[in-house]
Amino acid sequence: MKKVILILVDGMRPDGLLGCGHDFPAEMLTHSVHDLAARTVMPSVTLPCHMSLFHSVTPERHGILSNTYVPQVRPVKGICEVLRAAGKSCSFFYNWEELKDLSRPDSLASAVYVSGHVYGYEEANPRVTKACLDNMTAGGSDFSFLYLGWTDAAGHNNGWMSDEYMRSIRGSLDCIRSVCEAADDDTLVILTADHGGHGRSHGSDMDEDMTIPILFWNRNFTSREITGTNIIDIAPTVVTTLGVTPDPEWEGKAVAL
């Protein structure tokens, strides 16, 4: 694979993905290596989970325990720093501003931020998706990160598994489908979530909060179910796919695709 696009739908539970009424999840499963019972880290909160995804260590090591970023006491390189050092290009397309700290200065080739708080996540999701598609049309980056925040907002505002939550997943899947349709045969698309949720919250060690989907999609893949995957396995899988050695500090293991 020559390119990797990581799409994260904030707060998307696997049963929400499968039960939202959209037809694209079935198509993705047909062409993916997937774990629909993968695990995230504690606390199951957005920024700690993203830091663990990008740096392949638990929150105990990166030190981010809430949605407030603090510099790491003993810094661990993330996906973007490792790829930048290997001469690869990285781009971000996101609508929750706190994610700006997932990469260190000079590790991104480009970034597009559209505030979900200012424009509303229902509008911000397709806007950042369009920016990602525009980048793909222009040749794309070796690694692209597309973050879609509407589902988490719907969960907090209306409840996880509510009608509005399911509608937000369907809207997110419209964005995801457009990216997959635009991806060429040499592109791996990874679909995942940072955490789940229950009621109108998340952050606990309940299965509803801790269980996430991870799908590694390419139109030429055949369906294969895997088990035992953790969110910290995504970073080594990304860089290995691009022919780069994972950082020795990382704790996750690359998934065999």
Image (cartoon, grey):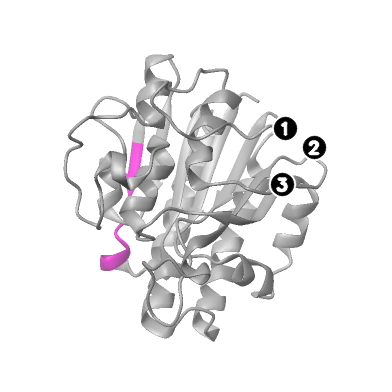
Residue visible at 68% across and 28% down in the picture:
186
The image position of residue 190, as x and y in percent, is 59, 44
Q: Secondary structure at mark 2?
A: loop
Residue pointed to by mark 3? 226
Q: Amino acid at mark 2?
A: Asn
Q: Residues within 10 Å of mark 2 (few under 14, many from 20)?
A: few
Label 2 vs label 3: CA separation?
A: 18 Å
Of tags 2 and 1, the one toward the viewer is 2
- Amino acid tagged 3: Ile
Q: Position of residue 5 (x, y in %)?
A: 54, 39
Query: Which residue is drawn at the image coordinates 30% and 45% (left, top)?
Result: 60
Q: Mark 3 falls on what kind of element?
A: loop
The quadrant of the picture occupied by the C terminus is top right
Q: Position of residue 242 (x, y in %)?
A: 57, 23
Return the mark for residue 185. Answer: 1
For numbered disc 1, what is the local secondary structure? loop
Amino acid bearing label 1? Asp
Q: Earlier in the sequence, mark 1 or mark 3?
A: 1
Tell me what residue is drawn at x 71 percent, y 61 percent.
24
Tell me how many marks there are. Answer: 3
**Toward the viewer: 122 or 257?**
257
Q: Which mark is residue 220?
A: 2
Q: Earlier in the sequence, mark 2 or mark 3?
A: 2
Label located before the other in sequence (2 or 1) = 1
Viewer-side residue, 257 vs 23? 257
Q: Are marks 2 and 1 in contact (CB under 8 Å)?
A: yes
Please identify, in this view, whether the residue under mark 2 or under mark 3 is nearer the observer. Answer: 3
Q: Which residues are magenta?
A: 111-118
